Amino acid sequence: MGSSRTISRTIFSPAPADPYAHPDAQRRFRVIENVEELAQALDSPWEKWMVFLHPSQREIVDRDFVGPARVAGSAGTGKTVVALHRAVRLAKTSPNARVLLATFSDPLAASLATKVRLLAGPETTGIPRIRVASLSAIAAELLELATGRRAHIAKDDQIARALEKATADAGLHAKLNFLRSEWTHVVDAWQVRDAAEYLAVPRLGRDRRLGSKQRELFWPVFAAARADLEARGFATWPAVFTAATRYYANRSEKPFSHIVIDEAQDLGVPELRFLAAIAPVGKNGLFFSGDLGQRIFQQPFSWKALGVDIRGRAATLKVNYRTSHQIRRAADRLLPGPQRDVDGVVEERKGTVSVFNGPDPKIVIAEDEAAEKTAVAAFLKEAIDQGVVPREIGVFARTPELLHRARRAVQAAGAEPLELSERGHDPGDRVSIGTMHLAKGLEFKAVAVMACDEDVLPLRSRIDAAADEAELEDVYDTERQLLYVAATRARDRLLVTGVKPGSEFLRDMGG
């Protein structure tokens, strides 16, 4: 933040009076509880900040739960840090502890693994007891151990071709958008195996209520597509999760003693079934952290119906200590108020308190891409000149095709860009650039979100591919939430840009 380092020098300079009573400190810190510890964390090396836990969140880390539990909270309330500290605590409870700390992607898992090592510090005895991985990696690994076979995952275009071929062979005329949506959200997600299951499967959030005759008509298409993929040796990720679930569901011995899941709002049906199957029964077996406002992948469904009932064991964090008040306030305008999951558990954003101030986010709607590049380069250069190192900066765009704009802006600022990937990388002394999806779970002192143009947010191809009105509404919701995720990766400084006329979301964000 623009004045943070000056204020920090004032805070830590020798003085007879209490430095936290200084007006500058009062302006920076909105909640003067534990201000000394927070001030030191904000000015400590970035690696230490990444694992800093606000004292008000400690109770969730230390609490014991009998049954599945979930902690929620808006971006910046420290859900991931709670999950990290909780995993480390559970690993220390017993020399026989086997803790799984998992999330939905490999890059996030790599980031969590780095933070576990930072958090453990010189005390390394607990680290071997913590397995950090993506959920898909764990499912594939456990299934291979059980069967001796490695799964070969079908790509999206292979699935699409199988559906098209099955439709043509059946002599039917149906839109590919509808077939792919029905396959993804119903047939494959629930691993429907026959016509009777297809008739009975829950269809929460689906606007198009197919009658029994329509389902009877389309079921042979889905059955043939699956048979085609399996004949060629391909599986889908839901099939992998389901196979692993069947293996472990009735076994008394489970692969882990404790399971901690980060970014739980993006769990799908097969993932949750899998976790219910591999989780041990008893105290602290299964713990989730997540925020419905950051859901960008999955459609809603009932956790309780799948055997994961968190009612009575759900908590919401209310202290935002990882994002400035100004950034949080702007980002929150993108989202509705309270959000309720299918089981009736409410996540209330109202009442969240930010504990430090920073400069107001900047929203720039540029005349053209050249003007946008100039604005972003100036933002980045100012941050670097004021002490933010390149590795503490992120620049994001909606799709890979738009990353050239981020790359040019970083280079115009005199810095070197590093493109994030699913593998994850150490940025070194470079500015991270990547898609908004890859921003999820990351954290930077300064963030620029670029190319927020009309037809980019929400993405036109997703709108055109929506199969029904309910899915179209979900597209708008998740596109808003995606911008929210990208914007809240910033702790101190945020710039959001687009080319005229700009995304409609930018007007909402600007207040």
Image (cartoon, rainbow, N blue to C red):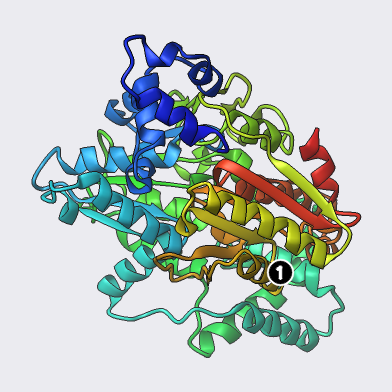
Instruction: Give 165 or 419, whichever is nearer the viewer.
Output: 419
**Residue nearest the viewer, comparing 218 with 195:** 218
Q: Position of residue 133 (x, y in %)?
A: 35, 60
Q: Where is residue 333 in the image (x, y as percent from the top left)?
A: 74, 34
Occupied quadrant, residue 175: bottom right
The answer to whether residue 5 is above or below residue 457 is above
| Above or below for 421 versus 453 | below
| The one of 420 and 176 positioned closer to us in this rendering | 420
Whether residue 458 is visible, yes or no, is no
* Left or right: 190 in relation to 39: right
Q: Position of residue 352 (x, y in %)?
A: 57, 23
Badge 1: residue crowd in 10 Å (few <14, some 14–19, many ≥20): some
As drawn, 258 above or below 144: above
Q: Is residue 418 visible?
A: yes
Q: Is residue 226 left or right of residue 275?
A: right
Residue 162 found in image quarter: bottom right
Identify residue type, mark 1: Arg
Residue at numbered disc 1: 405
Farthest residue to the left: give it. Answer: 95
The number of callouts visible is: 1
Residue 120 place in picture, x, y as percent: 20, 46
Q: Residue at x 32, y 26 (%)?
A: 58
Tell me the quarter of the image containing the C terminus.
Answer: top right
Q: Quadrant of the N terminus?
A: top right
* Residue 161 falls left or right of residue 111: right
Among the 4 quarters of the image, the one containing residue 140: bottom left
Q: Residue at x 29, y 38 (%)?
A: 86
Q: What element carries label 1?
A: helix
- The one of 246 and 262 positioned closer to us in this rendering: 262
Residue name at image x 76 percent, y 45 percent: 363
